[in-house]
Amino acid sequence: MNASPDAPTILMVPGLRDHVEDHWQTHFAKAHPNVRTVPPLQRDKLDRSARVAALEAELSHITGPVVLVAHSAGVMITVHWARQHRREIHGALLVTPPDFDAPLPAGYPTPDELRLNGWLPTPRERLPFACVVAASRNDPLARFERVAGMADDWGARLVDLGEVGHMNPASGFGVWREAERFIAEIG
């Protein structure tokens, strides 16, 4: 995927664990010249408004068309951002969104922590840009049916990735070549 001068800028929106060296988003960003990444927060890491502000700040440095590529809680950052801002976005690839309305596994924020930090309720309004939601059949952070419901509410095309866990290094994913196909479809 070579960037032409008029190609959209791809903005990676990582989840709560921010930048993981062997994550597919990190590999993708290193391999493509037209990719930027929302930088990690130095404090207030669980604060939804701080995460949305970081996304908005990074977008303010980009002129021209943008494709958002979000993973996990990055999807939730993106949908909360879309509810508050009206910048034109070319499209979005939303990969394995978590179900913050259900208890998450041990080691993840509790529903009370998520509520206190502004993540709940999960926005369910139609998104103002074209998007693809890529969902896993065995994601420990969200049942497929719940993600399908979010995709439908957001007006997104749902892609069934099969049994790929949470699409992270713990699930065996580093480089994810299919991301290029989905981004090209949007961009």
Image (cartoon, rainbow, N blue to C red):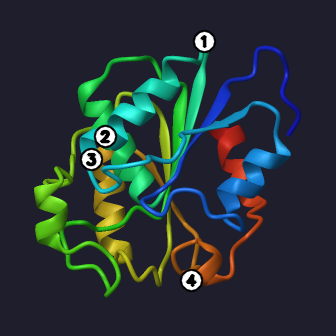
How far apart marks 3 and 4 lie (CA) works out to: 29 Å
User: In this rendering, would 1 be left or right of 146?
Assistant: right
Report which residue position mark 2 lands on: 50
Check disc 3: other Cα within 10 Å, few if <14, some if 14-19, many if 20+: many
In the image shown, does 20 or 185 lie closer to the viewer? Answer: 20
**Image coords of residue 28 (percent x, y):** 75, 51
Check disc 2: other Cα within 10 Å, few if <14, some if 14-19, many if 20+: some
In the image shown, does 64 or 178 lie closer to the viewer? Answer: 64
- Secondary structure at numbered mark 2: helix
Q: Of circles 4 and 1, which is in front?
A: 1
In the image shown, does 53 or 164 lie closer to the viewer? Answer: 53
Q: Amino acid at mark 1?
A: Thr
Tell whether label 4 touches label 2 (CB within 8 Å).
Answer: no
Q: Amino acid at mark 3?
A: Arg
How far apart marks 2 and 3 lie (CA) works out to: 5 Å
Q: Amino acid at mark 4?
A: Glu
- The mark nearer the N terminus, 2 or 4, is 2
Q: Of circles 1 and 3, which is in front?
A: 3
How far apart marks 2 and 1 lie (CA) works out to: 22 Å
User: In this rendering, would 19 be left or right of 96?
Assistant: right
- Residue 106's tag is none
- Residue 163's tag is 4
Do we see residue 170 in this rendering?
Answer: yes
Q: Amino acid at mark 2?
A: Ala
Which corner quadrant of the image does residue 9 belong to?
top right
Report which residue position mark 3 lands on: 48
**Quadrant (top left/top right/bottom left/bottom right) for the C terminus:** top right
Tell whether label 3 touches label 2 (CB within 8 Å).
Answer: yes
Report which residue position mark 1 lands on: 63
